[in-house]
Amino acid sequence: MARIEIDGQSYDVQDGENLLSACLSLGLDLPYFCWHPALGSAGACRQCAIIQYKDAEDRRGRLVMACMTPVADGLRISLNAEPARQFRSDNIELLMTNHPHDCPVCEEGGECHLQDMTVMTGHIFRRYRGLKRTHNNQNLGPFINHEMNRCIACYRCVRFYDDYAGGKDLQVFGIHNNVYFGRFEDGALENEFSGNLVEVCPTGVFTDKTFSAHYARKWDLQSAPSVCIHCGLGCNIAPGERYGELRRVVNRYNSEVNGYFLCDRGRFGYGFVNSPERIRKPKLKGYPDITVDTAESYFRNLLKTAKPAIGIGSPRAPLEANFALRMLVGEENFFLGLEDTEHILLNTIAELMLDGGIHSPSLREVEQADAVLILGEDVTHSAPRLALSLRQAARNASFDLADTLHILPWQDAAVRNLDKHVSTPVFIASVCATRLDDTAANTYRASPEDIARLGFAIAHSLDESAPAPAALSDREQALATTIADSLRQAKRPLIVSGTGCSSLAVIQAAYNVAKALPSINKQLAFTVPECNSLGLAIMGGRPLSQAFERIGNGLTDSVIILENDLYRRAPSRNVDLFLQLADHVVVIDSLENKTTEHAELVLPTSTFAESEGTLVNNEGRAQRYFPVYPETESVRGSWQWLTNVMEACQWRHHDQLTAACASAFPGLADIIQAAPRSDYTVKGGKIPRQPHRYSGRTAMHANVNVSEPGQPHDMETPFAFSMEGDMEQIPPALLPVIWTPGWNSNQAINKFQQETGGHLRGGDAGIRLIEASGALPWFSDIPAGFMPTPGRWRITPLPHIFGSEELSLHSPSLLERLPDFCILLNPLDAETLRVDTGDQVDISSLAGTPVLKVPVRIEPTLPPGLLATTAGLPAFQSMKSGAQVTLKKVDRQVQL
Amino acid sequence: MKKQVFEGLSPAEIKEINAETSHYEDKAAVSIEALKIVQKYRRWVSDDCLIAVAELLDISPTQLEAVATFYNLIYRQPVGKTVIHYCNSVTCWMLGSDQIQERLCRHLNVGLGEMSTDGEYTILPIVCLGACDHAPVAMVGDELRLDLTENAVNEIFGR
Amino acid sequence: MEKMNKPLTKNIRPDRAFATLADYESTGGYQGLRKAITGLQPKDVQQWVKDAGLRGRGGSGFNAGLKWSLVPMDANVPQTRYLIANADEMEPGTFKDRMLMEQDPHQLIEGMIIAAYAIQANTAYIFLRGEYHLARRRLAYALLEARSKGYLGEQVLNSAFSMEIVLHTSAGRYICGEETALLNALEGKRATPRAKPPFPLVTGLWGKPTIVNNVETLCNVPHILHYGVEWYQGLGRGVDKGTKLFGASGRVKYPGLWELPMGIPIREVIEKYAGGMRDGYKLRGFLPGGASTDFLLPEHLDVVLDYEAVAKAGSRLGTGTIIVLDDQTCPVQMVLNLEQFFAQESCGWCTPCRDGLPWTVTLLKDILAGKGRIEDLDTLAGLTRMLAPGNTFCALAPGAMEPLQSALKYFRDDFERYIVGSHAIMEPA
């Protein structure tokens, strides 16, 4: 700590920090543009000018940029000195010489950092009489608008996109006051984190195109704390609603999880909430129009008369809904709804996390790793936000060297300049090339078996008592030794694996490596496919295949399926048979899908945006999300449908259900602490979901009825569907919107953090359920290496950020970024088949049954003998993971 | 004029660019040289060329364009066989560079940056050429022309 | 020993032919290198140059030997080091380095080898302006010659020291002359300056310790080594040591470049060497050291050309090449020409420079077009205060403000003359 004097007052601040960051951490107002806590200092915008004094006698001082000046004990500075104020105001005036006066039609208006800073500096009068420079804009794809005339050239966009996120297709062109931030040519931004430009840009150059399509001012959006449901990481989000429609998703800061950034699936995948495929009313086969009451009594009746129903849970439904279903049907009749392989993988991961004795890191901890081994995972596609964190970890060697050279970590360009000649040991073993390969010291592309074998060999190399794979090639042995040597030296080594390549051996090998590591600060991170995969695994239950058996045996005749499209889980034939054999099929879901088509009774459930629930992310962190807006009349939360039909149900409220779930499962005991209970009040009132400037409330339903309807009551959460209420001192888990006077943009987050970039005051949202304990024996079931069979290929689904997740596939903007419908083949295989990229092949089962006709893309990094598809893409649903198939080129003429 | 089909960088261009890479710690460092090499053969850098150079240097076209558009001597538009850079910095300006520009442009009937109809010349301003003791000056192709007078047209285009 | 008073230009011939290796060696060339590499430790070479008092000739005026001695040589930092000759001469009104490189390229090469030896750099770059085609050809030839005689390459002069010089030609931008922007340019990036600290001598080219010296600075080095510190110190007339290339351009009788002792009065340069003003023209003022220095007036003619004296008079020695303003050139138009140059050459990185300089240009154009208002002069003055050293990311904009601020001080009438008529606007209704 250092003691510094600011405008005559003494403060204790962090040594080595820059003064801008220090001032913001103290809660002082100092304007800035180019600095960003995650990006460090650039010194470009010159907005954070302050006066620094030599000593107590120095009355004049000199102007310095706070962001470029390190804290030092005894430092004396002034934010308020007139020369500094004047300079900051003049600097804004210069920025404004080219900035258009289009705030009323600009989508950034009302949450614009440039507006805030302009007001803060007091620049109010325009002296510039010249012309403003103008630019053409580019079409940057379905996610991002481009309005270059608004640019103030703070360089944050390229510093985020290129430097931080590893993007290659956004840059600055030109020179002097004619700098242009864009792509070489029109086209969708390629980087998976492009959406963050919307929040990184301090003004309206990059705005959310999906939001534009149904725009509302920030102050007119209703919001509640939420959690992203598009992968297993549980990034915190702040969705915004108006007129009963979800309008957008922005980042909600959580220092342990997503920090400042989201991936594009998380940000733009929300479109499914507004989809025309949403189920808005209960449906009963043969009865076109039924009421909620009828549906409910039919459901209740069915439970009474039928044989004991079985319940199929879901990894995309919250704990409470799964728990309610489990209680409704009884433990012995509850199935997790996972296909066998995934079931085993998730159970194994849960077991390793609970009893393996190795710490599972948060994303913040991932960023601290000084050596990384990724085993079998293309993280960018299976858990995108984790990839962004790993990219930061890959720079830790530069930070270490910078420390030696007395370069402070926030001196961004200087540290980046060291990137070239030191590298953090990052090793990636994957089925084919990954988007993180550019950060890797070594990559290894192989079949899952061979990846597992490499892992086992690394573990053995680290600890001789770990079993070694037999007959490893010299090359692989050498690689294993290299990797083991690097990992052994690391202080904070991290092993990353997961369900991405559907291999148990890979997961077990990852554990062996982690177990064999000598460091006490070692970490083991697993990715899981869905938002509550881990929660479901901790809860426990039977695999889907046993449900199929159960009905096959005639032990039951009715099935309740909770938020789960079984056709995504198992081969269509099996699901068809299962649903036919059941006399009664009740499906609770939010979107029409193949499973709902087969249901006798469909009960419409709310999405994450209209309901509450608790999810457990891949780290073992329980987090609660809350309804942003009330569900329409006939739609209910799954838990409500289920508890309503229970006999003598003692759980009237969500809190009670959460508590019951917590006491039923020791592993979930702490979930009640994920967020305060619904009776939490601020100054005796509920927390408003609507900002105090929310407009139009008395008029927005006037087309229906001129008398203003009453606000719906929320009995389940601490929030009100209203603008009334106090916003002070709200715990982070309950912060609906980040706002503070004078700070209307997302930069207001500074005011809610203990220090810039640090934890939220009052603690980050959510609670870790799992701390490392116990130890498990070595896994020794080492597979043989993969040997391709000539003329046969093995189907290997690979996750894709825009193709593999069920719900986001219903978002129109995301559909524009779907991966091409094609299979990947190794060049040698393509040669054997005489096919080129773009040619079609017929895929047939070994029995000769035609499966699919599909175009080929040659992928040099894919091992021979494998046929890669996009996991989860409906077009590939007929192709069973791991199955062997034959391929035949489709004659060109036939193709035409 | 018929649009020429781009058939990739020539072997000579590739060889020269690759030779440059040995002098630097990484490939991307030869970005500027590479563009200049292409320009030596083709006078200017077309989009196709830029993409080809980027590929050769393992960087994206966007990254190379960021560099190409920064520098003054990289032409991203067609220029004449000979580029005439007349100095318009302070000493040359004082001694009549405006008139020289005007005379040259009128002679070729072009504006700044345009190509003369015969494709021979383009006139561009340039900053101080470091020959202020002989102002006003111009650079015709690679060659410095000193002590220009009101007869600049004759002095440059010759007899 | 007559030529010994002009070590830098002793090989410069009126016919502009260049000194070959044989020519260069015949006047004592490469003796300094031989002495350094066979008889002195790197630290000693640093000390000699430091003691000689050689100050950076690119405009900074920092002691060259002292700069070298600050390069970290410990074991725990990168062991690759680089030396760069800054040959990106582009300051308007400056034409000294071109002559040195075109006519005596070995002098620079020898200086570079000695400097590289002093900091134990095995690779050096000449960062040459793209427009200096003749200099490029002659340097390339001289490098071949030097290599063939063993001055360059493996085991220089059979010592343990090896080094190579790479000739890099730039693609034209004034900002490349800023040493950290130069590093980015050499790395094939956009030439925006880097923040200092950290200084290039700690982390420079590709993050390695790097020394950037101006061509003229490096050209002094062989002579210091060859003839010794005391001899060198004897060359200056005033506080500063050695000789320097001084020049004059504009409407003087004999514009040119002369090697003169440091500390010579400005009057001597303009009146004696440049022959005074052309007939019919009077001296109105002058920029003493290139475009980014403050105007001085005829009353300053007796100021001597060393760093402190010129600074005391309110300007900077800069590059030592004087741009003369005559009585028939409008100072406002001249300032516009200068500001247009600086606005165009701003790299676009920091706000005050990127947006302040174009505004300056707009205001000056308005004034010259008769659309100026009297308060515009306050706005211009405000901009000169705002774009002051330390307020911007690098020295480009502060340099740009020097001629403007001094013009506003010395030639205010000229500005106001254009605004006549608009005075009415200011009068109370």
Image: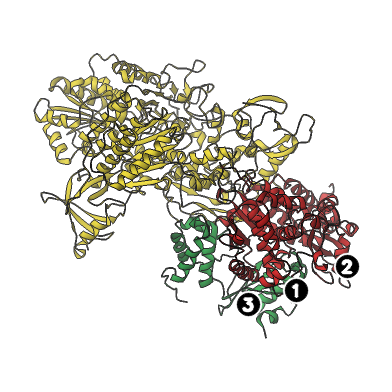
Chain colours: A yellow, B green, C red
Circle 2: residue type: Lys
Q: Residue at x 57, y 44 (%)?
A: A414
Q: How many callouts does the rendering have?
A: 3
Identify the element where label 3 is drawn.
loop
Taking depth in this image into account, of C5 and B87 the one nearest to the observer is C5
Residue A319 point in image, percent of width and height: 31, 24
* Quarter of the picture holding the C terminus of chain B: bottom right
Rendered position, A305 above or below C26: above
Q: Quadrant of residue A784?
A: top left
Q: Is residue A307 left or right of residue A520?
A: left
Circle 1: residue type: Arg
Q: Which residue is mark 2?
A: C272
Q: Chain of mark 2?
A: C
Measured in 3D between alpha carbons, the distance from the residue under mark 3 to the one under mark 1, in whole angstroms, is 41 Å
Circle 3: residue type: Asn
Mark number displayed over residue C13: 1
* Label whose residue precedes the other's in the sequence (1 or 2): 1
Taking depth in this image into account, of C20 and A595 the one nearest to the observer is C20
